[in-house]
Image (spheres, coloured by chain):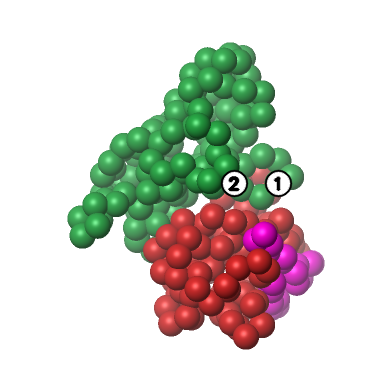
Amino acid sequence: QVQLVESGGGVVQPGRSLRLSCAAYGFTFSSYGMHWVRQAPGKGLEWVSVISGAGSNSFYADSVKGRFTISRDNSKNTLYLQMNSLRAEDTAVYYCAKGGSSSSWDRADYWGQGTLVTVSS
Amino acid sequence: DIVMTQSPDSLAVSLGERATINCKSSRNVLYSSNNKNYLAWYQHKPGQPPRLLIYWASTRESGVPDRFSGSGSGTDFTLTISSLQAEDVAVYYCQQYYSSPFTFGQGTKLEIK
């Protein structure tokens, strides 16, 4: 069955960097787009980024554009989110989610358990 | 950016009664080439990841009980729970995936009356 396991979260100082990983199991990873979605404490869901199955296109929320980079290694069945110039407002649980098809323009049908990122001095 | 606005923000419904959540997008999310509305509904319970309920505005995800249904087109959408069960207590979100950024609504908190 589909399983997504995020890692790499933790406490980081403002302005520093962190890389999240999401290991995927139970499906043909390269055939599906992948999303990152976050939830700040006490807030709603915020979509962060998506990458197509082949990795040929990617898109970002305005709040992270220019600071975050999504990527994937289809040989390792792993999704990444490189987060630079972190701010306090980036503090959130970060979920990776599988897309419904190889396209970027699709729903998120399976979600990982999430990893907590705390940006604090 | 497309803004998604849900109503109400919170809702209390008696067990066995109908619950209705609305979602309005600031722009059309119906793609004319394939006649699909790029709109999904998710259920989110504390301590769990979100769960996809409905996609393409009205297609129920596999394994989702048939008391959950989605309707609407263009800019106005509705999630209906026909007979509320205790396990349906959660926050519900709509999301458009028509145009990046793929924005969520602010969420609707559903409780038992």
Q: Which chain is red?
A: A
* A44 is higher (above) or lower (below) than A119: above
Discs 1, 2 touching: Cβ within 8 Å: yes
Determine the residue positioned at 59% across, 56% down.
Answer: A110
Q: Which chain is green?
A: B
* B52 is higher (above) or lower (below) than A11: above
Badge 2: how crowded within 10 Å, few (<14), some, or many (20+)?
Answer: some
Determine the residue positioned at 44% across, 33% down.
Answer: B69
Q: Secondary structure at mark 2?
A: strand
The reply to whether the magenta stretch includes residue A93 is: no
The answer to whether residue B9 is left or right of residue A2 is left
- The location of residue A94, given as percent across then percent down, is 65, 61
Specify the label residue A96 is tagged with.
none
Please name the residue that numbered disc 1 is placed on: B48
- The location of residue B91, given as percent across then percent down, is 59, 36
Instruction: Magenta stretch: give its range.
Output: A1-23
Determine the residue positioned at 62% across, 75% down.
Answer: A79
Tell me which amino acid carries mark 2. Arg
Circle 1 chain: B
Name of the residue lying farthest toward the bottom:
A75
Q: Are marks 1 and 2 on the same chain?
A: yes
The reply to whether the magenta stretch includes residue A3 is: yes
- Depth order, front residue of A12/A46: A46
Please name the residue that numbered disc 2 is placed on: B51
Asked if one can make out residue B98 in the rendered structure from this viewpoint, the answer is: yes
- The location of residue A102, given as percent across then percent down, is 45, 70
Circle 2 chain: B
Determine the residue positioned at 59% across, 46% down.
Answer: B51
Q: Kindly report the distance in space between the C-alpha atoms of the residues bearing marks 1 and 2.
A: 9 Å
